[in-house]
Structures are given as structure tokens and as C-alpha cells.
Image (cartoon, rainbow, N blue to C red):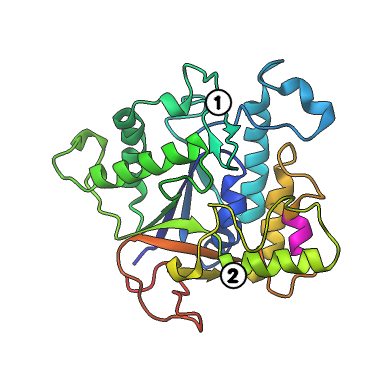
Amino acid sequence: MDKHLLLVHAHPDDESIGQGATMARYVAEGTGVTLVTCTGGEMGEILVPEMAHMAADQDDTLGDQRKIELTAAMAALGVTDYRYLGGFGTYRDSGMKWHDDGYAIPADDVHANAFWHADLTEAADHLVTVIREVRPQVMVTYDQFGGYGHPDHIQAHRVATYAAALAAVPSYRPDLGDSHDIPKIYWGAMSASRMREGLRRLREAGDTTSFEGMDPDNLPPFVTEDVNLSAMVEGNAYYEQKMAALRAHATQITADSPFFVMAEGSESDFWGNEFFRIAKGVPAAPFNEFDLETDLFNGL
């Protein structure tokens, strides 16, 4: 079997945060890896002062810069097949604002071309074409809440889910390629026990600023209780590649961000091991000591 993994993400940097080690591991093992990014990330917060002029309310060129960053990140992970949904610029980053309860919601003003406003069937058809071309056995995307409520993450979940269903129907749009049914679909996840452990270690060390306001006993919605996890890809051997990919997204992630602070000296390889919830298919052996699949392709 020629194994192939498809990942569907909302913005450049989401892929490296969520599955950077997984991508690097599968590439190293000879598995085909395709990344589809749904927007250019035009509305992202710019953390590099000298690039502040790229903001949407100024030069509005951040998408071009983030395209450069994604290219560098994929080089770090070894991924050669990475695409934008419908082509670069087809869908714009929708932006977001924070709800008082600590999760993301759509911004007050959303661009007419924003991904949040995309026609679901039209967007799904772009992905159907990719699915039928690369014919993955496994697809990874977000849960129905997009992890933390970002409208583009939610829309990426909707588009990926709908596209997977449409791609499997032989009579649906044969002009987009021969039908293909993806056997296993996963939602990226973060282990609650790992997050609690990491936060407690930081707080005990006197760090009160990393993940500011996050309480180990009252975790945010993007964290998944371990009972709902299905798989853990052990990617600690590819931790350095993941960190290099994160650093490549320089406008979005700073050297003193929690991603690097949590990882510094971490005995649990906090960012190396990546977790998943199964959304389609059946978890299969071998399992690790936590009763989690060790390989997303198990059973295929």
C-alpha cells in the first residue's frame, strides 16, 4: 500500500503547531504527505515590529509574507506537497475576536472574500479534487469547534468533512476525478493530562506569564480529556524539525512564546508527541501503554 496523509488547516503555522512532528515523521518514513491550507493568514497578529506595515489595515501584504514562512516551515519538515485551497488568494483569512468566555468568535467586520463566507460546496469541491488526486488513507483536520472557536478553523472542519463525503460518491462530479473514500479521519487534539502536567511544572518553576491566565484545573476548550483521545504519534525524534518549522513562522510565533518555553527541558517531550481523536474509522492495534494508536495508519 502506498500510504498517504492529507492535512487540512486554516492558516499558515496551524500545521506546524498541531502536527509538525507527525508530518516530519511520516515524510521520513516514506509516507506521502499533502498539506492543504485554506487561507493566506492575512489577518494574523504581526509579532515582528519591522513588519508591522504588512498588517491588513496598512499595506495588507501579510499573506505574501506568511506564504514565504510556510515554504520555509515545510522545508524544515521535509514536506514537498503543500497547497492553498483553490490556489493562493482564493480565500482570505476571516479574522476573529475574543469572546468574554475565552474562545474565538467571528470579528465584527469580515472581508467579503473571507473563508468564513465561502460557499461550502464550492470550497469542498476544491478539496474533492485534491482528495481524488492524492487518494489518502488518512485525513487530519479540526474538530467541529475548530479547537478554540476560530471561524476559519470551524470552516476548515466543515469543508474537510463535506469534501470527504462528496469525494467518496462515484456519481458526484466525475469531472473532479475518480471517487475515493478516505478510510480514517482524525481531529487534531491536545492531551489534557499533558497540558496540566506542563502548566504545573511551569507554575512551580515560578513562570506565571506563559499561557497567562490558563489554570491547570480549568483548561480551555482546545484541550481534550484523555478519555476522548484515540491516537498518539510519537514524534519526539522530530522535535527539532517541529521547532524549526515553528520558528519559520516568525511573524506569528516569537522565540519566547509558550511553544518554546513549555518545551525547554521538558522530560515529557510536550510538543513532540501529538494527539488525535478519531472521527471516521476504527482505532487499531498496536496500541501504546495509554491505549492509544501509535500510527494513524494502523489497521489499514
Magenta span: helix, strand or loop, mainly?
helix
Magenta extent:
259-263
Residue at point 68% right, 59% down?
241
Q: CA distance from mark 2 to mark 1?
A: 32 Å
Residue at point 42% right, 36% down?
155
* Residue 295 visible (yes or no): yes
Q: Residue furthest bottom?
A: 289
The answer to whether 214 is drawn above or below residue 64 in the figure is below
Tell me, yes or no, whether the highlighted magenta stretch contains residue 142: no
Q: Nearer the viewer, residue 249 or 77?
A: 249
Looking at the picture, how far across and down is residue 88, in whole percent? 51, 28
Element under disc 1: loop
Which quadrant holds the C terminus? Answer: bottom left
The answer to whether 104 is drawn above or below residue 297 in the figure is above
Looking at the picture, how far across and down is residue 85, in whole percent? 44, 34
**How dense is the environment of label 1, judged by Cα within 10 Å: few (below 14), some, or many (20 and up)?**
some
List the residue tagged with mark 2: 193
**Pointer 2 or 1: first along the chain:** 1
Check residue 107 in the rendering and tell me which mark sits there, or answer none.
1
Residue at point 40% right, 47% down?
144
Query: At label 1, which amino acid type do we have?
Result: Ala
Looking at the picture, how far across and down is residue 104, in whole percent? 56, 38
Q: In the image, is 167 to the left or to the right of 45?
A: left
Q: In the image, is 243 to the left or to the right of 188?
A: right
Looking at the picture, how far across and down is residue 77, in whole percent? 62, 55
**How dense is the environment of label 2, judged by Cα within 10 Å: few (below 14), some, or many (20 and up)?**
some
